[in-house]
Image (spheres, rainbow, N blue to C red):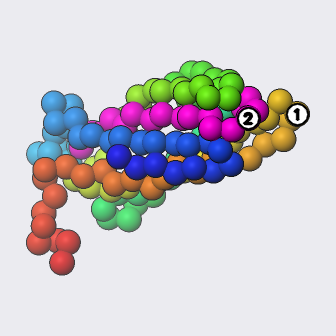
Amino acid sequence: MYTKTTKKINITVNPYFLEDQSEPENQHYVWAYQVTINNLGKESVKLKNRYWKIIDSNGTKQEVKGEGVVGEQPTLNPGEKFEYTSGTPLSTPSGFMEGYYEMETKNGSRFEASIPQFSLDSPFIDSNKLN
C-alpha cells in the first residue's frame, strides 16, 4: 500500500497483479489498483482531472490525462472518502505509476494532489535482470 498527502488530501493506492487477465507468453501483463482519496481538510474539493505517468521496466513511458476518474468528478466534503478501482496493462512484467489529481476548491482555486509512486510487480520478473 502506498500513501501520500497533499494539502490535506490523502491518496492511498493498493496495486495488485491480475494473473487471470495476463498472458506472459504474449508479453501482456495486467494490474488493477484501488485508489482511496480522503479529504482530511476543512473545505470541500472536487476532483476535476487526472494525470498518470506509467513506465514499464524497459523505460517506455505512457501518459494518461483526462477529466475525472472512472467517469466521475467526485466532490469530497471534509472527512469524506472516494474509492475506485482501475487498471493498466504493460508489455513487461514490472513497472511503476505515479501522477496527480487536479482538485478544485469551492472558491475555484485549483491544486495538484500527488498520487504516490507505486510499483507494478508480477511473479514473472526475472530477478537476474535486476542486478
Magenta segment, principal secondary structure?
strand
Q: How far apart are marks 2 and 1 (CA)?
A: 13 Å
Counting other residues with Cα less than 10 Å from the Cα at mark 1, is it few (<14), some (14-19), or many (20 or more)? few
Residue at the disc numbered 1: 107
Residue at the farthest right position: 107
Say which residue appears at 56% left-offset and 34% top-offset: 38
Three-letter residue code for mark 1? Asn
The answer to whether 120 is drawn above or below residue 77 in the figure is below
Which element carries disc 1, helix, strand or loop? Answer: loop
Q: On the image, which quarter does residue 86 sit in? A: top left
Residue at the disc numbered 2: 42
Dividing the image into 4 quarters, which one contains the C terminus? bottom left
- Chain part drawn in magenta: 29-46
Three-letter residue code for mark 2? Lys
Taking the image as shown, residue 10 lies to the left or right of residue 27, namely right
Q: Pick the residue in front: 46 or 6.
A: 6
* First in sequence: mark 2 vs mark 1: 2
**Which x, y percent locates residue 26?**
17, 44
Instruction: Decide whether residue 42 is among the magenta residues.
Output: yes
Say which residue appears at 16% left-offset and 30% top-offset: 20
Say which residue appears at 55% left-offset and 27% top-offset: 81
Q: Is residue 95 visible?
A: yes
**Which x, y percent locates residue 17?**
23, 40
**Which x, y percent locates residue 46?**
71, 29
> In the rendered structure, are the residues bearing label 2 and label 1 in contact, judged by CB atoms less than 8 Å apart?
no
Q: Pick the residue in front: 41 or 125.
A: 41
Which element carries disc 2, helix, strand or loop? Answer: loop
